[in-house]
Amino acid sequence: MGLPRGMILPDGSLDGRLIARREALYTGMNGSSVERLRLTVGGSCIFKPLTNDGQWGAELWVYKHVLPYFPPLYPRLLAASINSQEGRHWLLFEDLGSLDHSFREETAIELMQHIAWWHAFPTGGLLNGPLQGPKPPIEMLAADLISDEENVLRTGEELGVEAIHLQAVLNILKRGEMPFEHEKVLSHGDLHAGNYAMSDGRLIVLDWEHMHLNSPFWDLYHVLDMSHPTFPGTMTPPVREKLLEAYAAQRKQHGCKQDTELFQKDYALYAAVFSLWMLRLIEGDIRRGSALWPLPALIRQRQETVASLSQCLERFLG
C-alpha cells in the first residue's frame, strides 16, 4: 500500500491526525522504538526512527545505492525524512505483518544461498558510502582477548570450557595466525535471528543500516553462532556443517573455489574468537545489570554462546 496524501507534512514530520494507533515493536540501542502505525484510512506501515546513533543516514543510503540491485529480500521503503539540522531521522517501510523468526534449516539454507550471492557483489562503488559495522573488526576483538588473557581463561574455565583449548586459540592469536582477513566482501553486518524472518513463505532480511565490507565469516557467524537475548537458538555441529556446505557450494557457482575442510576449520577459529569476545560482553551485562535485557535472557544467551564456543573449538582443534 501507499501512504495517504498529506501523511508527511512540509517540515518532514508525520501528520498525527492520520495515525489511529501506534504499536511498539522493539526498542533500539539508543532507546528509540520501531513502531507499527495503524492509519485512520486503513492499512498500516512501519515507522523506524534512528535506533543506533552511529548510523545516521546509513540505511537510507543502502536503500538508494545498493538494494535496488538485490533480489526482493527486503521491505519496501515508502518514505524517509533525514535532516541533521532538525535532528530528524526516520524511515517508513511497508508492513509485512507477522514475521516468523523461528530457526528452520530450510530457511537458513535459503539465507545462506543469498548471503553467498551478495558476498560476490561488486564492492568498488561502495567505498565512499557510510558503511560501518556495529562491532569492531575481528583483529580488534582478537587484540582485546590477548590483552585480557588472564580473565579470558578464568571466565572460560568457570563456564566449563576446556582451558587447554582456550590457551591454544589465544596462542594462535598472539602469533598473528588468523587466516581469514584477506577477502573483504559486502556484509549485511548484523544478521542475527531478529533480522531475518519468513513472511507468507517469503524470506525477508531486515535492518540494513550496518552494511559494510568485512570477512565473509562475519555474516556467517551472525547467522550460525551469534546468540541474542531476545531470539533463542540452538546450533549443532551437523547443522552448522550442512549450512556452511550450502554457502560454500553457492560461492563456488560465483567463482570462489576453496578447500572444504580448510574453510570449515577457518570458520571454526573465527567463530571461537568472536564467541570468546561475546562472552566478555555478556558477562559485563550480567554483572552491571543491563538496562536493555532481563537477567534470565542474558544467562540463556551466555549458555548458548558457551555451547557454540565449545563446538567450534572442538571442530578447529579436533
Image: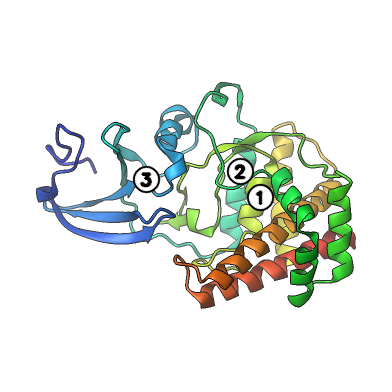
Q: Earlier in the sequence, mark 3 or mark 1?
A: 3
Q: Is residue 47 left or right of residue 157?
A: left
- Asked if residue 234 shows in the view, the reply is no
Q: Residues within 10 Å of mark 3 (few under 14, many from 20)?
A: many
Quadrant of the rendering where the C terminus is positioned:
bottom right
- The nearer-to-camera label among 3 and 2 is 3
Q: Residues within 10 Å of mark 1 (few under 14, many from 20)?
A: many
- The nearer-to-camera label among 3 and 1 is 3
- Asked if residue 243 shows in the view, the reply is yes
- Residue 142: % across, % down: 75, 50
Q: Residues within 10 Å of mark 2 (few under 14, many from 20)?
A: many
- Residue 245: % across, % down: 74, 51
Q: Is residue 51 left or right of residue 261?
A: left
Q: Looking at this view, is 91 or 252 the one in front?
A: 91
Q: Is residue 304 above or below residue 68?
A: below
The alpha-carbon separation of the residues under discs 3 and 1 comes to 26 Å
The alpha-carbon separation of the residues under discs 1 and 2 comes to 8 Å
Circle 1: residue type:
Leu
- The nearer-to-camera label among 1 and 2 is 1
Q: Mark on residue 115? A: 2
Q: Is residue 177 left or right of residue 136?
A: right
Q: Name the residue rendered at 43%, 47% in the picture.
A: 52
Circle 2: residue type:
Ile
Label 3, on which residue? 50
Q: Are marks 1 and 2 in contact (CB under 8 Å)?
A: yes
Q: Name the residue rendered at 63%, 70% in the picture.
A: 302
| Quadrant of the rendered image containing residue 183 | top right
Q: Mark on residue 220? A: 1
Task: Name the element at disc 2.
Answer: helix
